[in-house]
Amino acid sequence: MDNLVFERTKGLTKKEFSYCPGCTHGIIHRLVAEVLEELNVLDTAVGVASVGCSVINYEYFDCDMQQAAHGRAPAVATGIKRVNPENTVFTYQGDGDLAAIGTAEIIHAAHRNENISVMFVNNAIFGMTGGQMAPTTLPGQKTTTSQNGRDPYVVGMPIRMSEVLGQIPGAYYVERVSVHNPKHIIKAKKAIKKAFQNQIDGKGFSLVEFISTCPINWRMTPNDSLKWVEDSMIPYYPLGVVKDGDKND
Amino acid sequence: MAKVLMKGNEAMALAAIKGGVDAFFGYPITPQNEIPEYLSRELPKLGKVFVQAESEVAAINMVYGAGGAGARVLTSSSSPGIALKQEGITYMAGSQIPGVIINVMRGGPGLGGIQPSQADYYQVTRGGGNGDYNCIVLAPENVQEAFDLVKESFDLADYYRNPVMIAADGLIGQMMAPVDIDKETPKLDLPEKDWATTGMKNRRTKENKDVDPNIIVSLSLVDTVLEEMNLVLQKKYTHMRENQQRYELINIEDAEIVIVAYGTSSRICRSAMEILKEEGIKVGMIRPITLWPFPEKAFAEIPESVKGLLTVEMSMGQMIDDVKISNNGKLPVGFYGRCGGVIPEPEEIVNAVKDFLGGLNG
Ligand SMILES: Cc1ncc(C[n+]2csc(CCOP(=O)(O)OP(=O)(O)O)c2C)c(N)n1
Ligand code: SF4
């Protein structure tokens, strides 16, 4: 077909996503899948699904996959990559998974400069379990376990994982992106590509943090969610490169 | 035959290499540190992987990843560290990932101590992980057997696609003994690891270009599917129960009392049996080598002459539950144990046998 202008990426299976309407997990999946296809690594890729709404993304990505215990995906990825360094290994983790229960595993994967790519989806809430407070929940944000809004006096201020990871000597590349509009989606894809290219080039630990929506648990319409990303999330979680080993050479 | 004087922990580390280990992931804890120390030195020389993880939780999840990617993988720890590994172990069992876990047991509970103990019997045979799962658990009695069992354990793990545990204790780990390091151990016919996540490329052939992703997973949100997945595991466990029960019977013919003991306890009981023999008291021993599957079959071989079973453990009585189940109410079951890292003297066991016998005759 000469006039083919768009085709579904080969990086995704035919399985329909189970995400809620307006959830940006789906966009991030597609971007990751497109990058795997474009870098021609689908055939050598091994993904690690974490525990969260994306837990069954082993049914969505069309490559070998392992499903990891909650928070442990970076350790699982370490095991895979260390024994088969020729594989392109990535994790896909939520903010409950990466910023709460899995802090030790992500910090030490970065610390060891594991040559893996981490897709970190920050929607400021525990989506899968029904909208509980996450370490990333914004001050004043209402969740099922912070019903009057997050009180920083009681539970502290939200953690900025990219900044935490960016100051670890071992981390090679850390960037925060958003997928709330086409302009940012294009930027996000570039960041994903860099994170995977770094791995292919043997440069080491690369992480992309995505500011993502959870309309269901935020109790907002999909449109309001996108606006909330712009107005509330991004001011607290500034977008851009936090660390880039290429620039420090 | 090359016999080399080795510490138990080093012998187990070397056995792992001889058993074809590709990668080790672990976190330091006494009394098993010679295992990671030895492997940190030797594995890189062989082009193999050694990673000191940030915790036992991370280490076992690295084992999960590497085992799921088709490698032969080892982790080792001691009691409190094994407690942390339980999460990963149930995930391995559920996702059918082979791997070997060495537990060089020390006294508990809590931080406990660093002296030898068998107080993790429940931990290794019942598991602390969630769900219906089992690991094959092998309990060596001495350094040579520790070497043999570790070497063989990789085949067992691959054969069943299931974690295998070695339940050693601090004495076996720290003791020096001559080891035949060229000893052949049983080998199994192993199928290809066509389930491993090595990338789809590795499975594409000229004839078959269409391959499906390999997925390592223990999850299903559909109850009937999860039940099916469980039944697959249960079928393996049944096979293990039927084919992997291992034990040694020592002098049980016309014995009056049969001791049941494993690992370091059984070594000490052997000395006690010598003393008792000289005194004309007929004592035999069932020595479980597999703690799971527990060697129930051994109990069918107990002769008529036996009046009672005496379980001896370096714990306050854990294996005794399995002894009672296997005995099924037939004979009186007694117990002698020390704990906290105290190793019983043979004389204590001699007295325990006499007391037990006296009670039975009395
Ligand atoms: C050990 C353990 N603790 C708790 C849970 C329950 N749990 C499942 S998902 C989840 C949080 C997921 O939140 P996040 O990582 O932010 O992903 P999201 O669902 O928002 O995409 C929790 C706590 C679990 N599966 N395992
Ligand atoms: S609960 Fe939230 S994160 Fe999960 S699928 Fe729905 S919108 Fe997305």
Image: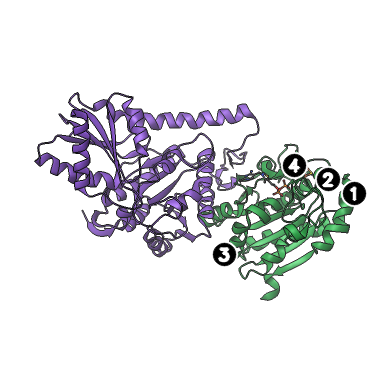
Q: Position of residue A156 (x, y in %)?
A: 73, 60
Name which residue type carries label 3: Arg
Sequence-first tag of 4 and 2: 4
Q: CA distance from mark 3 to mark 2?
A: 36 Å
* On screen, residue A249 above or below A90: below
Residue type, label 2: Pro
- Given the image, what chain letter belongs to the residue carrying mark 2? A
Look at discs 4 and 1 and give the one toward the viewer: 4
Taking the spot 31% from the left edge, 41% from the top edge, the residue there is B186
Q: Secondary structure at mark 2?
A: helix
Residue pointed to by mark 3:
A112
The answer to whether dots 4 and 2 both sit on one chain is yes
* Marked residue nearer the N-terminal end (4 or 3): 3
Q: Position of residue A192 (x, y in %)?
A: 73, 58
Q: Which mark is residue A224?
A: 1
Contact? badges 3 and 2 (CB < 8 Å)? no
Q: Which residue is mark 2?
A: A215
Chain A in the picture: what colour? Answer: green
Residue A139 sits in which quadrant? bottom right
**Callout in the foreground (3, 1):** 1
Using the numbered discs, state the Cα–Cα distance from disc 2 to disc 1 in whole angstroms.
8 Å
> Are the residues flagged by discs 4 and 3 in contact, CB closer than 8 Å?
no
Q: Is mark 2 within 8 Å of ligand 2?
A: yes
